[in-house]
Image (spheres, rainbow, N blue to C red):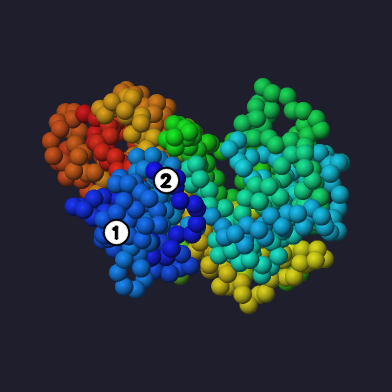
């Protein structure tokens, strides 16, 4: 048996399959369906045959890669004429990490860089170390990073000092522009990808490892080239801002859990970074309070983190909630992004703004009706005037911010509905995108906003670095304004594609983890779940490993697993109790409640339901549920 083939770009006319034998021929049938709206590599159409015959030999037609029946493989089909062959062996379809790798390839991700790009990345790191250029030396300034424990690249670091009536904060961002010259092979490849894609146990980086995890990563104890935003804050007011290229040396690589322990008083902060963390905490708290007073959205989400064993199996899912340490970094990064965007707008330098338009009034009215139907308190809506005037977009933005805060208060008081009600709020909003035209960011209640703080993993941030450095005499050329409309559209499209890949790969990982869990607990194990979505065909339910018969859903880690309970499997419970008979369900006009016509039973968003797993399709990330009677 040969080793797996080397990583490399998936051909446009390619698909992932499991090899089968039909008579004396090897055949390959596509494993994954083409997702709706998913572009192919370079936005070219994806060709997907029903099944192809590879040949009679073990290696398939062409003999390029040795693979056996049952192997997970990448197949390339000829553009013209007949013929297909295996270009890479990926592993086995019963191994989670192999299926996730296959999904990423099937969605057009390259899973590697060309040798010229790799060489250019390695040379760029050496060049910047040898010729750092004109930089302000901040290596004696106490500096730290805060990231997840599993992080491999660190593109932002913080320094902070208390001053009279305020705090001075330095936000240091990796100087990717110094390593990636505009128009270079590195730049063209980064522009093509536009964003890093994070799947469970795998990442498709925008930049090669030599930069993303080495030369541009702000690791502790090493001199690193950075672009620094220096802010003097008095409360939440930015008294002054300065921008320049710098050289820094991080003193500590902190993680969110450790910082939360420090804030809770269960662990001591060490020097020289302890005072800096304390000062940064004060600044972030002031910024958070000001944003809340101005009506910024409040949506507290949980992100899953997956743990794997050495064989590629998912061994654990940990739901990471937003804590004070997360908010510290979030609010300081927002402040830096706003400061950069304001300077660029004031000086008329072309860049890509991060735009989040105000919500449509009709969608906000519908959100209010949806929440009211679930007994979630809502603010009063403006009545139509005698002239028939409708709610303004400004009023709509203020109202949805207030609704998000009331949802958060309701969830904390009742202990359920966080995911369901938060999703309702999100669906009422416009989708954020990149544009050279500044239209503000409604969710943050910011009049001028851009992405600047993650140039290792987002191309629009690199564009803003070049724009900023051109504006402050940093030696970079300003972006060409005429090219930014098309670039903004491309970056927005690739961002949405990355989100789809990440969501679908999360679903696959959850399914593999659930299969292993049921192998231990048994197929009839009862889970306590929470209803997170409703359609006429059924209910989407989130449930956790801790759910046991009789346990409240609110006590379980609800984001661990997700599945669908079809209406055909639901039974009604009337006044006399559950009768187990067939029920006909009708979805209300707000898509928040399913009503049983025969028994009068209701299934409500945010409600609890006991279920067991009926079937799992791990390849497609689908779980079907049945009610626990």
Of badges 1 and 2, nearer the viewer stands: 2
Disc on res. 54: 1
Mark 1, Cα crowd under 10 Å, few <14 / some 14-19 / many 20+, is: many
In the image, taking residue 78 as reference, residue 380 lies left or right, namely right
Measured in 3D between alpha carbons, the distance from the residue under mark 1 to the one under mark 2, in whole angstroms, is 18 Å
Find residue 43 and report its horizontal and vertical position in percent. Answer: 45, 68
In the image, taking residue 140 as reference, residue 564 lies left or right, namely left
Report helix, strand or loop for mark 1.
strand
Image point (36%, 43%), residue name: 92
In the image, taking residue 347 as reference, residue 451 lies left or right, namely left
Instruction: Please indicate, yes or no, whether residue 301 appears anywhere in the rendered image.
Output: yes
Image point (49%, 64%), residue name: 493
Image point (41%, 61%), residue name: 38
Find residue 339 and report its horizontal and vertical position in percent. Answer: 73, 57
Report helix, strand or loop for mark 2.
loop
Find residue 196 and report its horizontal and vertical position in percent. Answer: 56, 54
Q: Nearer the viewer, residue 574 or 231?
A: 231
Q: On the rendered image, what quadrant is the N terminus found in?
A: top left
Return the residue at label 2: 2
Quarter-wise, where is residue 428 in the image?
bottom left
């Amino acid at each position: 048996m040969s080793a797996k083939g080397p990583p490399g770009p998936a051909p446009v006319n390619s698909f992932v399959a499991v090899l089968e034998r039909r008579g004396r021929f090897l055949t390959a049938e596509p494993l994954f369906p083409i997702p709706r709206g998913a572009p192919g590599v370079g936005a070219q159409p994806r060709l997907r045959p029903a099944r192809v015959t590879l040949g009679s030999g073990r290696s398939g037609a062409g003999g390029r890669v040795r693979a056996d029946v049952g192997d997970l493989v990448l197949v390339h089909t000829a553009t013209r004429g007949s013929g297909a062959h295996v270009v890479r062996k990926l592993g086995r379809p019963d191994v989670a990490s192999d299926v996730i790798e296959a999904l990423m390839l099937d969605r057009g991700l390259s899973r590697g860089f060309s040798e010229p790009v790799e060489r250019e990345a390695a040379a760029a790191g050496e060049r910047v170390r040898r010729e750092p250029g004109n930089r302000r030396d901040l290596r004696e300034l106490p500096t730290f990073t805060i990231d997840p424990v599993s992080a491999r690249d660190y593109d932002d670091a913080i320094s902070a000092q208390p001053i009279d009536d305020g705090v001075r904060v330095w936000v240091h961002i990796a100087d990717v522009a110094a390593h990636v010259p505009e128009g270079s092979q590195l730049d063209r490849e980064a522009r093509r990808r536009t964003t890093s894609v994070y799947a469970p146990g795998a990442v498709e980086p925008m930049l090669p490892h030599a930069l993303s995890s080495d030369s541009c990563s702000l690791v502790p104890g090493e001199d690193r080239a950075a672009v620094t935003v220096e802010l003097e804050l008095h409360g939440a007011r930015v008294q002054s801002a300065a921008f320049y290229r710098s050289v820094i040396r991080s003193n500590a690589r902190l993680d969110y859990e450790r910082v939360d322990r420090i804030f809770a008083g269960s662990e001591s902060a060490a020097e020289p970074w302890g005072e800096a963390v304390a000062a940064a905490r004060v600044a972030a708290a002031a910024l958070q309070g000001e944003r809340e007073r101005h009506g910024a959205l409040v949506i507290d989400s949980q992100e899953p983190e997956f743990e794997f064993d050495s064989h590629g199996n998912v061994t654990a899912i940990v739901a990471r909630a937003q804590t004070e340490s997360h908010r510290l970094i979030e609010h300081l990064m927002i402040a830096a992004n706003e400061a950069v965007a304001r300077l660029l707008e004031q000086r008329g330098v072309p860049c890509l703004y991060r735009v989040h338009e105000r919500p449509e009034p009709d969608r906000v009215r519908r959100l209010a009706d949806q929440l009211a139907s679930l007994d979630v308190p809502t603010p009063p809506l403006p009545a139509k005037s005698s002239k028939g005037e409708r709610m303004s977009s400004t009023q709509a933005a203020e109202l949805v911010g207030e609704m998000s805060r009331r949802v958060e208060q309701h969830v904390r008081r009742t202990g359920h509905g966080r995911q369901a009600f938060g999703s309702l709020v999100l669906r009422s909003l416009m989708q954020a995108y990149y544009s050279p035209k500044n239209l503000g960011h409604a969710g943050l209640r910011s009049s001028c906003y851009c992405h600047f703080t993650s140039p290792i993993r987002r191309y629009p941030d690199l564009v803003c670095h070049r724009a900023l450095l051109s504006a402050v005499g940093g030696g970079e050329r300003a972006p060409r304004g005429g090219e930014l409309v098309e670039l903004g559209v491309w970056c927005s499209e690739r961002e949405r594609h990355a989100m789809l890949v990440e969501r679908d790969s999360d679903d696959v990982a959850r399914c593999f983890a659930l299969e292993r869990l049921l192998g231990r607990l048994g197929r009839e194990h009862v889970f306590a779940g929470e209803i997170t979505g409703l359609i006429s065909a059924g209910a989407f339910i989130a449930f956790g490993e801790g759910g046991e018969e009789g346990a409240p859903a609110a006590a379980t880690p609800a984001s661990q697993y997700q599945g669908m309970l079809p209406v055909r499997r639901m039974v009604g419970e009337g006044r006399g109790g559950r009768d187990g008979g067939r029920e006909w369900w009708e979805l209300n006009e707000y898509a928040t409640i399913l009503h049983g016509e025969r028994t009068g039973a209701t299934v409500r968003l945010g409600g609890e339901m006991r279920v067991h797993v009926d079937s799992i399709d791990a390849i497609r990330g689908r779980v079907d549920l049945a009610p626990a009677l």
